[in-house]
Amino acid sequence: MYYIRERANIDGTTYAITVKVTDYEGKLIEKTKTWKPNFLLTEKQLQFALKRVACSFENEVEEKYCGRLKPIATEETPFNEFALYWLDMLEKTKTPSYWISMVVSFEHIQAFTEGYRLKDFEPLLIDELFKRIDAQRRVEYKVNGKECLRKVVDATGMKRRLFLSLCGVSEETLKVAMRGERVCYKSASNIAKALGMDISELFDVRVKEVAYKSNYLEGMKKCIRNTLAYATRLGIIKQNYAYRQYVTCRHPDAEKVKSMTYNEAQIFMQVCENETIQRKLALTFLIMTGLRKGELCGLDWSDFDFEQRKVHIKRQYEAVATKGVILKEPKTAAGKRDIDLPQRLIDLLDEYREWYKEQKAKLGDKWGGEDNLFIAKNGKRLHPTTIRNWLDKVLNKAGLPHYTVHSLRHTYITLLVDAQIPVTTVSKMVGHAKSSTTLGIYTACMWDHDQAASDSLDEYFKKCKG
């Protein structure tokens, strides 16, 4: 219910509109708003305008304090409390990998954001929090088994399977440790515990503090930014000051996207020729189609149309923390696409099919696969991490610097755009939702062409001068 009181003052007549409502907890809320006409109105026009303003104000107060549903949060709500609500929403609406990444990021930032309310997140505070995030350090362990480890394990007299069960590590991990190669701290600790000895007696442990990777730090900032964005979208706060126009989001030491040069790509392809057919096909497929690692491992034989020389990208096979390796939809709607295959890949696929049939026949009843294109030793779908291991080995053989699997995708994009294929076409081929994303990758990858362009211009003006 609203009440209107007329007030006469030096500046003219104003009207005090008072609204009284009962909130969610049964308390009486009284709010007042002062309104003054901007134009000279007739009595009838004035009454109409007063009613319109009063009704609008009444609806505003009722919506805020006693709507049908209690609001999710207010600007006084603690940030960490609202972030939990946001994470619950993400689990239902976003991909498992994105949800898990934000959960992990929140676990790292909640100590920084503890005690702050949503309304406290103004540019100065956010800038301070981002600096504290950038300053974080983590402990890195380098653990290698000592020569005595094998003797101590053999001296137990236990059967290997029983000992592995006691340790909680895989047979391959134990073999690596006994060869003196690097293992993770947790595995080493489990082995030492099972043997009843201190970890330092069996392993060479080196500890140092290192900075987090820039992408990991960006994930923490993204968690803050997206939580506030959701609060803004719900109308809880008026402005999200964590956007880039207000603060610096990207870590200053963040690496640019890496892409192979032409010469490196040629050397890489030459070395691939001497690899096994499965490894050769996988790595060639990546650099000649720009597929993501998960998209490659998610391929089935039924996805191919060999007559039309096409492959249909429908799914990704991706490792997600706490959920294992799962099949899921492509990263974006544009990720579902058809790709034309070069004859080189068709030939490799024909060769690979023969190898595939031989493997299936050898395993017989032990074959655990279905229609999967890339397979593990048991015939089941290949784990995405294996692709990364294959790439590392080929790069070492080729004497090339380290590149990630995703760098092969960037190399593919770079080669296409540099071949003057329209950016819109390239964007469609690689499954980017926006052409600007493709162009951004291209400009980041092709920084070395700046010097070439400068040299060409220099040569041109030299000729003009002559």
Image (spheres, rainbow, N blue to C red):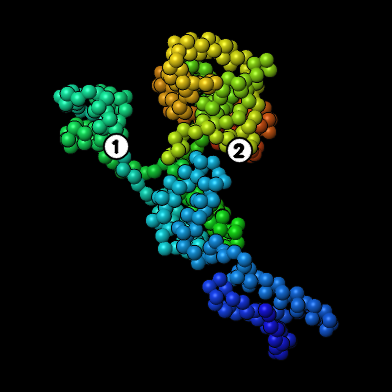
Q: Position of residue 249 (x, y in %)?
A: 50, 50
In the drawing, what numbered circle is on residue 332?
A: 2
Which of 169 and 387 lies nearest the eye of the viewer?
169
In the drawing, what numbered circle is on residue 235?
A: none
In the image, residue 394 above or below residue 7: above
The amino acid marked with disc number 1 is: Lys
Secondary element type, mark 1: helix
Which quadrant, please, contains the N terminus?
A: bottom right
Graded by Cα atoms within 10 Å as few (under 14), some (14 to 19) or many (20 or more), the crowding at tag 2 reads few
Which of 28 and 422 lies nearest the eye of the viewer?
28
Q: Calculate the distance from the C-alpha at mark 2 to the C-alpha at mark 1.
A: 36 Å
The amino acid marked with disc number 2 is: Thr
- The residue wearing badge 1 is 186
Secondary element type, mark 2: loop
Residue under the image location 60 percent in, 61 percent down: 235
- One can see residue 398 in this view: no
Q: Is residue 4 left or right of residue 90?
A: right
Q: Position of residue 142 (x, y in %)?
A: 28, 34
Q: Position of residue 226 (x, y in %)?
A: 53, 52
Q: Position of residue 192 (x, y in %)?
A: 21, 34
Residue under the image location 18 percent in, 32 percent down: 195
